[in-house]
């Protein structure tokens, strides 16, 4: 197995969508999952300013993992930040440091773009995810509560 970590391309849209759907099952929001391969293609690759960016872990013709992110251009530090929306590794590839490799490429992306932080959320029940992020040196931000306003 030789994993290549790279920025995604339009040809990856269907495989990225498949992993997004698997993540929706894992995180228990599959009933409200409304993304299609066409939405991935149009929103991530066909726009001059894409709605999101994606890094993939490629194993031959398979996408073993993905990390979806976007930029927060304005922050209090007067520097951009990156918001990591999704990190998912196919269960057949877990335990092989693929998530860590994806995160390290995201860190380089943040540094290249003069970002001050990488931000994300994790479900409180996802103990493996929490341990993974803490092992990387991430810290829980206890200063803010997350709110949603469904309209």
Image: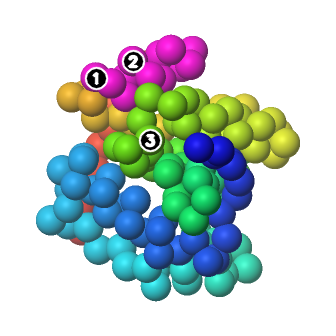
Q: Which residues are magenta?
A: 127-139
User: Is there a contact, CB below 8 Å, between mark 3 and mark 2?
Assistant: no
Q: Which residue is mark 3?
A: 93
CA distance for labels 3 and 1: 18 Å
Provide the secondary structure element on which disc 3 rests: helix
Horizontally, residue 73 falls left or right of residue 114, namely left
In the image, what residue occupies the spot 44% across and 29% down? 95
Q: Position of residue 12 (x, y in %)?
A: 57, 71
In the rendered view, does 112 fall on the left or right side of 138? right
Residue 42 is covered by the magenta coloring: no
Q: CA distance from mark 3 to mark 2?
A: 18 Å
The crowd level at tag 2 (other Cα within 10 Å; few <14, some 14-19, many 20+) is few
Q: Is residue 64 visible?
A: yes
Q: Nearer the viewer, mark 3 or mark 1?
A: 3
Q: Which mark is residue 92?
A: none
Of 22 and 31, which appears nearest the observer? 22
Q: Is residue 73 above or below residue 53?
A: above
Tell me, yes or no, whether the highlighted magenta stretch contains residue 138.
Answer: yes
Residue found 55% across the figure and 37% down from its top: 98
Instruction: Name the colour scheme.
Output: rainbow
Crowd class of label 3 (few under 14; some 14 to 19; many from 20; radius 10 Å): some
According to the picture, the residue beneath numbered tag 2 turns out to be 131
Residue 150, percent from left and from top: 23, 61
């Amino acid at each position: 197995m030789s994993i290549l970590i790279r920025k995604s391309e339009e040809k990856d849209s269907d495989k990225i969508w498949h992993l997004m759907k698997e993540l929706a099952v894992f995180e228990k929001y599959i009933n409200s999952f409304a993304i299609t391969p066409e939405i991935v293609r149009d929103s991530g690759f066909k726009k001059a300013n894409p709605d999101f960016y994606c890094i993939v872990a490629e194993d031959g013709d398979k996408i073993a993992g993905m990390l979806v992110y976007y930029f927060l251009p304005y922050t209090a530090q007067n520097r951009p930040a990156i918001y990591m929306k999704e990190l998912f590794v196919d269960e057949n590839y877990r335990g092989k440091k693929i998530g860590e490799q994806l995160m390290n490429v995201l860190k380089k992306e943040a540094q290249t773009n003069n970002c001050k932080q990488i931000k994300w959320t994790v479900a409180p029940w996802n103990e493996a995810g929490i341990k993974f992020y803490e092992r990387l040196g991430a810290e829980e931000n206890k200063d803010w509560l997350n709110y949603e306003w469904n309209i």
